Amino acid sequence: MMINRTLPVKGMKEMWKWESEKAKGVFVIVHGAGEYHVRYQWVVKQLTGLGYHVIMGDLPGQGTTEGPRGHVDRFSNYINVVKSWLTEARKYELPITLLGHSMGGLISIHTLMSLQKSELPNVAILSSPCLGLVNNPPAYKKVASYVLNGVAPKVLFPSGLESGSGTRDEWMRKRDKADDRLIKHVSVRWYQELCKAMEKAHKNTDSLPDVPLLVTQGGDDRIVNKQEVKRWFDALPLTDKYYKEWPEVYHEVLNDPGKEEVLAHLLGFVTLHEAW
């Protein structure tokens, strides 16, 4: 049995809870840049059907939230929102899995580094985390972004993502073309905050708490630089970490053909650590 509830969360328009009748754990899902919660309907349905509550919301500037679209004043705004979702998850008094995709993975990394030991989830899973980009802007655009960040931080420019580069799933591609809530332009400040967050994640690998970690990465990722993901992963001094790359799979490992196998592998890792 699944129950859908909409709960208000301070600082954003809304948050969603999907509840399983006999839950054995809770998933907190953090979506990626440009997207929002509706693109995780399949994942939510599978998780609730298998006995997990799911908590998820839309990040500031994306999906159904208010305020400038494609913009964030500070990366910490994202972290504060995810912390509120984790606070809600702890009320269940069940094992918690933090699942972050792409930019949501980068946000999850910084969130973990900001939590007290008593606030940590039992398991962390990063899906193609944004720790480097395949297509970096040319040098002149980077210089322009530094200048504009100081004088006009809300100026928007195209995200530069090629249509269909996230997934090979034709149904998802068709769905996305008809969805005007997906962000196709981002602000100068957003880009600068993303770059700083990626740099800090690489520099501060020693600050990541020793939580069981699974990185599940698309082998044919055309958005995130998988070499940078692996470089970050290899530098982590964790006692329990696992990296899994899926050959031929695009960036969105849970929205790509073969997602059933990816989810099964992911849940296997969670099951092993639920009593941790």
Image (spheres, rainbow, N blue to C red):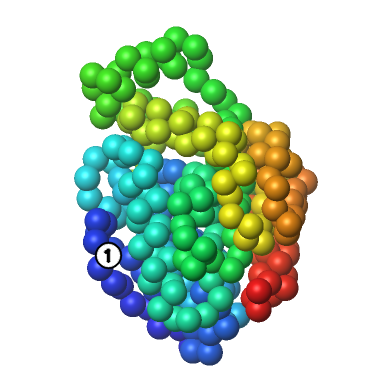
Q: Is residue 8 left or right of residue 33?
A: left
Q: Residue at x 68, y 45 (%)?
A: 236
Q: Position of residue 228 (x, y in %)?
A: 66, 34
Residue placed most toward the observer, 180 or 93: 93
Q: Position of residue 154 (x, y in %)?
A: 26, 29
Query: Image height check: is 272 above or below 218?
Result: below
To which quarter of the image does residue 177 belong? top left
Which quadrant of the figure contains the C terminus?
bottom right
Q: Is residue 66 left or right of residue 128?
A: left
Q: Residue at x 57, y 39 (%)?
A: 204
Judged from this view, the residue extending furthest toward the top is 140
Q: Residue at x 26, y 57 (%)?
A: 12
Q: Is residue 4 left or right of residue 65?
A: right
The reply to whether residue 251 is in sight is no
Residue under circle 1? 9
The amino acid beneath tag 1 is Val
The reply to whether residue 148 is in sight is yes
Residue placed most toward the observer, 170 or 235: 235
Q: Position of residue 56 (x, y in %)?
A: 42, 64
Q: Residue at x 58, y 49 (%)?
A: 208
